[in-house]
Amino acid sequence: MTAPLTVGETLPDIALTSPAGEAVRVADFAGKKLVLFFYPKDDTPGCTTENKDFSTLAARFAAAGTALLGVSKDSPQKHQRFIDKHGLAAPLATDATEDGLSDALGIWTEKSMYGRSYMGMERTTLLIDAHGRIARIWTKVKVKGHAAEVLAAAEAL
């Protein structure tokens, strides 16, 4: 799959890893809607806020028949510490260091800060319909109010 992502596409069947070390695939959510939110790094201010916001709304997402899954390249152990520290209700998964789902989707991309280039996760959210197709895409996400906007879209789908 090449960037940019488009509505109606299905995602490649690339496994992520749960904090317990188990494989997690988009196909595991077949028959229900899925919010897949990609974020740069556990325990940084914006990422913590985003994860807390999705966690606060987790019951409402569930009531709308929508699963949540936050994805970064942090290790499963780091995800578990992040979940425990902040009491997160939104499940997390680790993307592979190389050739992972975020690489295939073009979300793991070259970034620049203070004149230094590096690879990093572009904060992106995908709403996947019950048939496994992308229903909505948010790129270069601004955290404030984002989880509520995604919930509204999930409820309307």
Image: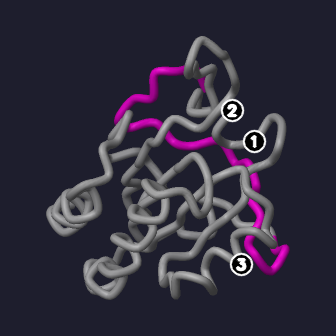
Report crowding for label 3: few under 14, some 14 to 19, many 20 or more residues within 10 A (C-alpha): some
- Quadrant in the picture for residue 101: top right
Q: Is residue 154 above or below residue 12?
A: below
Is residue 144 magenta-colored? no
Magenta residues span 1-22
Residue, x 15% and y 63% (percent of image)? Answer: 156
Amino acid type at mark 2: Asp
Q: Is residue 81 left or right of residue 152?
A: right
Q: Main secondary structure of the magenta part?
A: loop
Whether residue 89 sits left or right of residue 157 in the image: it is right
Q: Report how many numbered discs are placed on residues in the image.
A: 3
According to the image, label 2 marks what residue?
A: 103
Left or right: residue 68 compared with residue 41: left
Residue type at mark 1 is Gly
Instruction: Using the numbered discs, state the Cα–Cα distance from disc 2 to disc 3 in whole angstroms.
Output: 23 Å
Q: Is residue 65 above or below residue 135?
A: below
Question: Mark 1 packing: few (<14 Cα in 10 Å), some, or many (20+)?
Answer: some
Disc assigned to residue 100:
1
